[in-house]
Amino acid sequence: MGFFSSDKRFIVLNPSSGPSDVGFSIGNTLSSNIDPSLAYVTWHSSGEDSAWFVADGSTGWYRVSPTPAPEQGITWSPPATIVAGVKAVASIETSPGVHNLLLGPATTGAILKRSITSWQDNTSNYAWFAVVGSHVLANPGQLAEVMFFTIESVATGTRPSLSVVFDEAVPMYTGPFSPLNEWTADPPTVAESTSIYSQRFYASQTGRPAVCRHMQYRIDAPPENYQTEILSATIYGRLLVEA
């Protein structure tokens, strides 16, 4: 079973090995966004969908699962914000051998269930985004000159968009990211793939020198009923030594 301690850590009790503080890596996030008196924690296992779900009792949840082989450890997914909110969550055996993760509405409405073959919240499309980094590109005494970024994704739905910020870091930074609205195929000298979107975004679009020591980028996808899957993201540039 899992529970929150008084200091808002997420603890898993394993009868054979004792308690494990799996919430340590995002402890500050849990402390800021989870009220233990309102939270729900449940273990759900159905085919390839096996994880703990930590719901805040209002808007959504955090999902934590074992890291796939060959690596070891645990992996926290980005927070999920459910359209119209969610209160109680519980994994229930709804028929012999069939377990569903059931979602109680935040106010009134139908009880929903989680599905890994649908990309809507109760028939409503939703957008998603991910802020990645910070990426430390250069050590003190050096600068990184960024030329372009490449994102590869599965060719379904609308291509994702990219924006960047140099030498700033969310969440301390609350300003806008600079959008890179134009892209070319990557590599630009060969025919485009029909199964993979491969997009190259040149950093010069920011209108300022793309020279920094560290940076973050943001990937966005519009609300639509497709499984958007990012396969890789690359930052291309060179190191400069300060004079």
Image (tube, grey):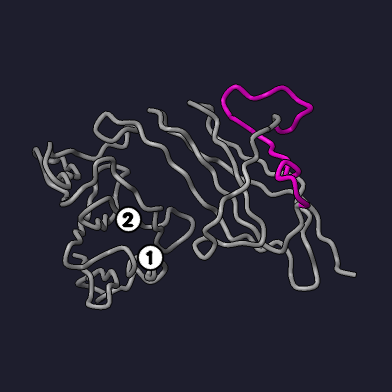
- Bounds of the magenta segment: 186-209
Rendered view: 38 above or below 132: below
Query: In front: 75, or 48?
Result: 75
Residue at the extreme right of the image, as rendered: 243
Q: Residue furthest left?
A: 95
User: Mark 2 packing: few (<14 Cα in 10 Å), some, or many (20+)?
Assistant: some
Q: Against 228, is 177 above or below?
A: below
Q: Are marks 2 and 1 in contact (CB under 8 Å)?
A: yes
Considering only order in the chain, which callout, 1 or 2, is on the residue closer to the N terminus?
Answer: 1
Q: Residues within 10 Å of mark 1 (few under 14, many from 20)?
A: few
Q: Label 1: which residue? A: 29
Q: Secondary structure at mark 1?
A: helix
What residue is at 11 percent from the left and 44 percent from the top? 93
Left or right placement of residue 166 versus residue 170 in this view:
right
Whole-percent x, y for residue 180 in the image:
65, 40
Q: Horizontal placement of 23 versus 231: left or right?
A: left
Mark 2: amino acid: Tyr
Q: Is residue 232 above or below residue 56?
A: above
At a point 18% along the width and 42% down the height, the residue shown is: 100
Q: Quadrant of residue 14?
A: bottom left
Rendered residue at 80%/72% (across/down):
141
From the viewer's perspective, tell me whether residue 39 is left or right of residue 221: left
Give the amino acid type for the residue marked by disc 1 in the picture: Thr
Q: Is residue 204 magenta?
A: yes
- Which quarter of the figure is the N terminus placed in? bottom left
Q: Which mark is residue 62?
A: 2
- Of 208 and 45, the residue lying toward us: 208
Q: Is residue 55 magenta?
A: no
Q: Which label lies toward us, 2 or 1? A: 1
